[in-house]
Amino acid sequence: MKNLQLSIQGIEELPDYEVEQFAEEALFAKETLVEKRGPGSEFTGWVELPENYDKEEFARIKKAAAEIRANSKALVVCGIGGSYLGAAAAIDFLKGGMHNLKNAGPDGELQIFFAGNNMNPTYINDVLELVKDKDFSVNVISKSGTTMETSVSFRIFKKALEDKYGKEEAAKRIYATTDKQKGALKALADKEGYQTFVVPDDIGGRYSVLSAVGLLPIAAAGCDIDQLMAGAASMREEILGSEDDYNEVIAYASLRQQLYEWDRYIEIFVNYDPDLRMFAEWLKQLFGESEGKDGYGIFPASLNFTSDLHSMGQMIQDGERNIFETVINVRNTPKDIEIPAFDEDFDGLKYLEGKPVSLLNQTAIAGTQSAHLSGDVPQIYIEIPDRSEFSLGELFYFFEFACGVSAYTEGVNPFDQPGVEAYKKNIKEILARYQG
Ligand code: PA5
């Protein structure tokens, strides 16, 4: 039974609302995706993944995660783009964005640090500083095995491990997630005897969170990956198994296309929970790399409310009318806190004493939504009930599917990223002068 709820507001008032036509196109795109008839269909293995995954590898992932938790206080995950964003999103959402700080003490659980997602020496030094005096392990993740950011950070953490434990013991602490048979990382892993996990051939980076790419770090963080897969499977069943073709995914994907036609070419993913910040980063990559092609593409942005209402609120309320908002809300909060009482009413908020802060947050959602609606900002509202692995699995699968359908509706290949090569090529050409 699915948990996710979707509602839409502020559309009817807009001219030429043609939802039926767009829904028909989205339904056709859905069929194209499922029947593997569209461009890039060789990379649609993620569609079946929640049901059809390698169970033997899944068991090895759980075993490796338990091993890391038993012998390490920190795990450094080296990867970039699709090779880290899903795991970072899941861990922040399920364990809380402050999990590393909370686990910093000697009795803390495993800390997870992400490296390889930039080329900044201060950042790398900081991670090194944080792990070097602890027992730690490394999970290097790269499908190609040749991504510069990942490779450079891996060299640094491999050296730190080898200096600390010696080559043989270090090799036992390195877990490589890469292509099943080719590439530099696979060759190195085989030579040095690292445990390896597979990025499936038919799944691209930004659709890989439910493969070993995301699952190993997520399981190492102590999250229940069985439930994550169960949530994704439930959403898949909802999208593909129900008699009614017109479901939430179709509603969302078709509406995005309609809005784009109306020159709403910026989609702002909004949350009211700082622990969803990395989830929004995952969404930006998913939609940005999948749709931004051939001169087309809704620009994905993200804002964290209420914080960003104090920076971007003016622009949203009053700036150019080129935006729409997709709000992601978690209905139940695991921890609440009451507003304390004082004798004096020094801030005029005495009437709120004893009320839970969650009430204020939910009120902020309602108040902001109606303000933005009155400012002509269409609203898509997606709600999940809780911060569970099951709900997150639903959310991941929902957006992956919606993204595939949206891109096909517009006729672009959602599964390649030719534009990403331009900067890589330039860097390699400039660095070539250091060779020989
Ligand atoms: O979605 C994608 O395919 C990309 O974002 C890749 O995940 C990213 O470029 C990293 O590539 P690789 O895993 O080959 O190191």
Image: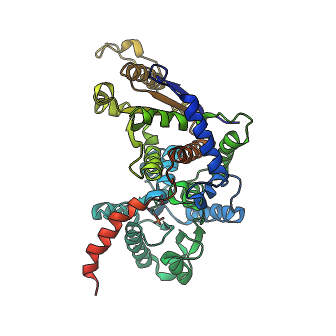
Tell me the quarter of the image containing the N terminus.
top right
Q: In this view, does 179 lie to the left or right of 118?
A: right
Instruction: Please say if 350 is above or below 138.
Output: above
Considering depth in this image, is 310 or 299 the residue closer to the camera? 299
Instruction: Please say if 270 is above or below 293.
Output: above
Tell me the quarter of the image containing the C terminus.
bottom left
Which residue occupies 52% across, 28% down? Answer: 18
Question: How many numbered discs?
Answer: 0
**Residue 166 locus on image (x, y percent):** 46, 81
Instruction: Please say if 1 is above or below 413.
Output: above
Evaluate whether residue 174 shows in this view.
yes
Which residue occupies 39% across, 40% down? Answer: 302
**Residue 379 locus on image (x, y percent):** 46, 27
Which residue occupies 40% across, 74% down? Answer: 155
Considering depth in this image, is 174 or 292 the residue closer to the camera? 292
Considering depth in this image, is 264 or 166 the residue closer to the camera? 264
**Residue 397 locus on image (x, y percent):** 59, 46
**Residue 177 locus on image (x, y percent):** 54, 68
Which residue occupies 63% across, 63% down? Answer: 61
Evaluate whether residue 389 shows in this view.
no
Res 52 → quadrant: bottom right
Query: What is the basis of the colouring in this image?
Result: rainbow
